[in-house]
Amino acid sequence: MSTILVTGGAGFIGANFVRHWRAAHPADAIIVLDALTYAGNRESLADVEGVELVEGDIRDTALATRLLAEHDIDRLIHFAAESHVDRSIDGPDIFIDTNVVGTLSLLKAAQAVWLDSGSGRPHRFHHVSTDEVYGSLGPDDPGFTENTRYAPNSPYAASKAASDHLVRAYHKTYGLDVTISNCSNNYGPFQYPEKLIPLFLINALHGKPLPVYGDGMQRRDWLHVVDHCWAVEAVVTRGESGEVYNIGGGAELPNLALVERVCVAIDEAFESEPDLAERFPDAPAAKGQPSASLKSHIEDRLGHDRRYAIDAGKIAAELDFTPAHDIADGIRETVRWYLDNEPWWRAVMARNG
């Protein structure tokens, strides 16, 4: 039996990971540390048994140190982050505070409890990062590998790159047992509604425009959050200390193609379930029209990376991980989840205005 600390465990990926770990390791104790800002929601963990949710800031080193020591925690999985590129462009300061200073705070706490105390207890600090630290690829470039040079292009990506370097430095300098994973774009249940897929889905249900940046041909690799959780578990439990693992979904698509898949999944749901038209009368699909008719091209985002792609060969070869979700089925499942969990996203949107 272990006790794990999950930072950001009430957020999108963190909550899915807590659910995954609870199912895979039912005997383990789970402590979640989350500031419960706009992206963290108690409701995402409400039905998960045996989880202690501590409301607090990862920048509070004393709190993190106390949690690690008092709960005898031996694994820290660090999801907590400010993660929306648009928000980082409008206000980069909080991204530095949370993603850089917050990560440093956790590293200091881990060093104090796991190394300086002299206990010698086996431990692991796993840091969850993003493929955006690598910058942008050309149309014919191979996917990012773990050896790709860092070249972040947004304040968000720069803050995550800095946190990656800090984690690596604590391994090299102090001997902290760390691993890092850099993932591609996640999708699935419990994602905050400002992100692309839930935003477009909820807008379509209410007959609102689907805003596509620029020409919509920016390419992204899409990773189902459940697959991501399996991969993180593999790294935490079997990954080599000090190593980096890229995690991809094997589904590289232009944004326009992804939007089309979301729209088709919505239209199919309305066709198979007539009462959706009564629940969402403003949706084009309620009137027999395609949801894609709501697409609207808007001015491109500042510094918008053109293409991300992941070479996930290392994690496949060393940890035997490959994603299980096909993108078409994954999008249908995600649309279905939001249709079945309307109270969740309505409560989130109401609370955050």
Image (cartoon, helix red, strand yellow):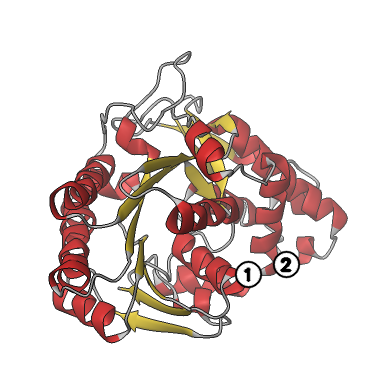
Residue 84 in the figure: left or right of residue 25:
left
Relative depth, front residue between 29 and 208:
29
Front position in the image: 338 or 321:
321
Which residue has dot 1 on it? 342
Residue shown at 58% from the left, 43% from the top: 320
Q: Name the residue under label 2.
A: 279
The relative height of residue 71 versus residue 13 in the rendered view (above or below) is below
Q: Which residue is drawn at 68% across and 43% down?
A: 263
Front residue (pair 286, 219): 219
For the residue carrying disc 2, how many other residues have a C-alpha within 10 Å: few (<14), some (14-19), or many (20+)?
A: few
Q: Give the mark nearer the N terminus: 1 vs 2.
A: 2
Instruction: Find residue 295 and report its horizontal and vertical position in percent.
Output: 58, 37
Q: In this orientation, does residue 211 appear?
A: yes
Which quadrant of the figure has residue 135? top left
Vertical order, 277 against 350 (above or below): above
- The answer to whether the residue labelled 1 contacts the one labelled 2, judged by CB atoms less than 8 Å apart, is yes
- Residue 65: image x %, image y %? 20, 76
| Kind of residue indicated by mark 2 | Arg
